[in-house]
Image (spheres, grey):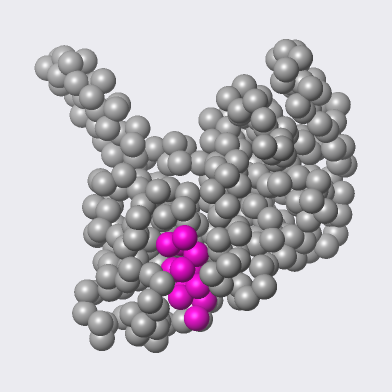
Amino acid sequence: MADFIVALDCMGGDNAPEEPVKGAIDALKKDKELRVILVGDEATLRNLVQDPGEDITSRIEYLHTTEVIETAEPPVKAISRKKDSSLVQAMKLVKDEKADAFVSAGNSGAILVGGQVIIGRMPGVKRAPLAPLIPTEKGFSLLIDCGANLDSKPENLVQFALMGSIYMEHVMGKKNPTVAIVNVGAEEEKGNALVKETFPLLKAEKRINFIGSIEARDIPSGYADVIVCDAFVGNVILKLYEGVAKTIGHVLKKAFKSNVLSMLGAGLSVSAIKRELKSFDTKEYGGAPMLGLNGMVVKTHGSAKAIEFKTSILQCRTFRDQRLNEIIRDNI
């Protein structure tokens, strides 16, 4: 099989460019058929690469850019004005088929706008959603949409459900994945106007395994494999998830340090606790793919470290190997 090429925006995110470069090198060590184009200030990037070995350096290319889209910049203006930014130029590599995938921890809005304007949506796809995996008691679920479309229509949510089902079955290996729509109750007649209009459409869609509504409290239990909502609701769920996980970690640490007996108990149980908490670490699941585009786009956390960049890059290779885009195109 031909080499797989990832265009990496090395200047976006809180820890750029050091962590993206580290993550790229780690991914190259893991996958011998992978090639990475490091996009950003070339002199800085070359200095960070140092000397990882000929096998690694021979699979790294550089694309020099002179601009950076900052986190707080208005997305549309940033994309139109900063043509030589690492984000825009990395996306153009995918558009021009010089790279198979794009990965960035940069400005979320600019990635969402750029994905649809530069790379473009597949024919028939009305909105391209962001779809991160979130940890649950049973393993993980797909949250779709979590940030791309704040004002969705019922037909958009139906497409999200279909794309999410395809992702979970063909990439994550969940046969006939269950689909639920986020609601304030289990009854079909409950919900806001969007949920009430979408529910019967999901119920009638024969290509998905729709099981009805899901309340927020049931999401961590793994009640559904695909969790469908508009981006406003999805982003709130995602941020709350992250905040609760961080708070639990702080509370446990405080409890373990409260007295000598607690510290002793912590010492005896720390391995088991770390093992269980690791399954709730979002870094283990890579970034959030933007589904329904003509190329692969993965947005990772703004505070991403090397391990998240590595996982996101390797995640793109899995998407290609499982023919994710082709299967979505065939079904939309």
Q: Residue furthest left?
A: 261
Q: Which residue is drawn at the image coordinates 60% and 47% (left, top)?
A: 320
Relative to 201, does residue 306 appear above or below in the rendering?
A: above
Looking at this view, name the residue that lies furthest to the front: 1
Q: Which picture quadrant has residue 58?
A: top right
Q: In which quarter of the image is residue 262?
A: top left
**Is 40 within the magenta?**
no
Predominant secondary structure, magenta span: helix
Q: Looking at the image, which residue is at 25% across and 82% down?
A: 188
Q: Is residue 102 above or below residue 152?
A: above
Q: Which of 174 and 237 is in front in this view?
A: 174
Measuring 78% from the left and 56% from the top, which residue is drawn there?
95
Q: What stretch is highlighted in magenta?
A: 155-166
Quadrant assignment for the C terminus: bottom right
Instruction: Indicate whether residue 161 is drawn in magenta.
Output: yes
* Residue 127, image x, y percentages: 59, 71
Give how far across and how far down residue 38 sits, in percent: 76, 34
Measuring from the top left, give residue 43's x and y in whole percent: 86, 26
Residue at image position (39%, 86%) is 197
Q: Is residue 226 at all visible to an observer of this figure?
A: yes
Is residue 150 visible in the rendered structure shown here?
no
Q: Is 37 left or right of 161, judged from the image as shown?
A: right
Query: Between residues 88 and 241, which one lies in front from this camera angle?
Result: 88
Along the line of sight, the residue nearer the viewer: 72 or 156: 156
Q: Nearer the viewer, residue 325 or 91?
A: 325
